[in-house]
Amino acid sequence: MKNKILEEKNSLLKKADLLMETLPFMRRYTDKIVVIKIGGNAMGKKEYIQSFAEDIALLQLVGILPIVVHGGGPQIGEMLKKLKIESNFVDGLRVTDEATIDVVEMVLCGVTNKSIVSAISLAGALSVGISGKDGNLIKAKRLSILDKNSDSNVEKAVDLGFVGEPSSINVGVLNALISQKMIPVISPVGIGNNGETYNINADTAAGAIASAMKASRMIMLTDVVGVLDAKQELITELKISEAKNLIQNKIVLGGMIPKLKTCISSVEEGVEASVILDGRLPHALLIELFTEHGIGTLIKK
Ligand code: ADP
Ligand code: MG
């Protein structure tokens, strides 16, 4: 009996120690803006979203100001398949015609956005889901890219349709929500000069928001442990120059290209550090922010 009480007491003391260990980290981020991007793949299962939402609610409770930006590529893909609308991809970007952009907006700003909002609400915090169109949050312009023909090596402009890039961010909308203790959950859809809808890569949207809001940190939750080197091993820390080399040497490919590029540009624009980590790991955000152990790839100056 005595032993059991002692055991219980020790376990409680350990818990208290653990809480105390997080104190310096909590203090470091109090009142600081942290932009968190959750990728479509890291939202693949309901339990990933719930664990993410609990972390977000806890961040807010300890005084951090989280802003969420979400993706939804796989979810858009599923709906297009159901509707029998076909897509082509250039450099990992979906060529987006008028029929496709409607589906993109419906999925991203509809079910995907609201599933995160309701998960955060279930976790006990208040959040408001908005798209880049609301309050002119993300003004966008058409993205133009050059594609290299692999045979002739000749570059030509590719028309991706309604794929855009942010041209300005209205921080007033976000500040209004944050000042009312509401967590913004943003779908990466932008509004053009003539009211047209643009599909924006969620990493790019998160980066533009992090820079405009002068965030302390930007965290990208994805479906790999972080940035992998040529031997497929995790790189725990990258300087800007090293990150640029990985892209140039084609060690980083596909969806990791906009992710790493965004981490580079936001750090260049004043975000203290950006992190790419595995969103499928339960409570990845808490481990990253509140312990000494970084678990993904940290990009800093
Ligand atoms: P998200 O939905 O999180 O934006 P993406 O599929 O767009 O995810 O980007 C992440 C993917 O990038 C990984 O699943 C992986 O297949 C790919 N990738 C390409 N090169 C690398 C690399 N060097 N390290 C890690 N992932 C890479
Ligand atoms: Mg992606």
Image (tube, grey):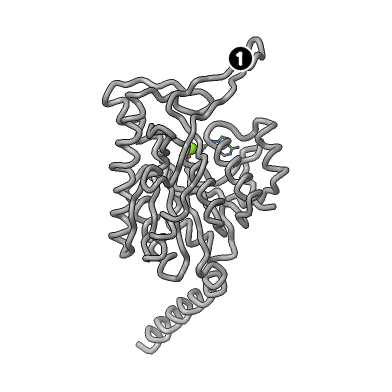
Q: Residue at x 36, y 29 (%)?
A: 101
The answer to whether 227 appears left or right of 182 in the picture is: right
Tell me the quadrant of the picture where the N terminus can be found: bottom left
Q: Residue at x 38, y 65 (%)?
A: 181
Residue at point 58%, 35% (across, down): 257
Q: Residues within 10 Å of mark 1 (few under 14, many from 20)?
A: few
- Coordinates of residue 158 in the picture (x, y in percent): 53, 19
Q: Name the amino acid, label 1.
A: Asn
Q: Foreground residue, 40 or 179? A: 179
The residue shown at (32%, 21%) is 85
Residue farthest to the top, as pictured: 152
Left or right of 200 in this view: 260: right
Q: Residue furthest front?
A: 194
Judge whether 240 appears above or below 18 on screen.
above
Q: Position of residue 6 (x, y in %)?
A: 42, 86
Residue under label 1: 149
Residue 265: horizontal and vertical position, in percent? 62, 45
x and y, in percent, of residue 97 in the image: 38, 22
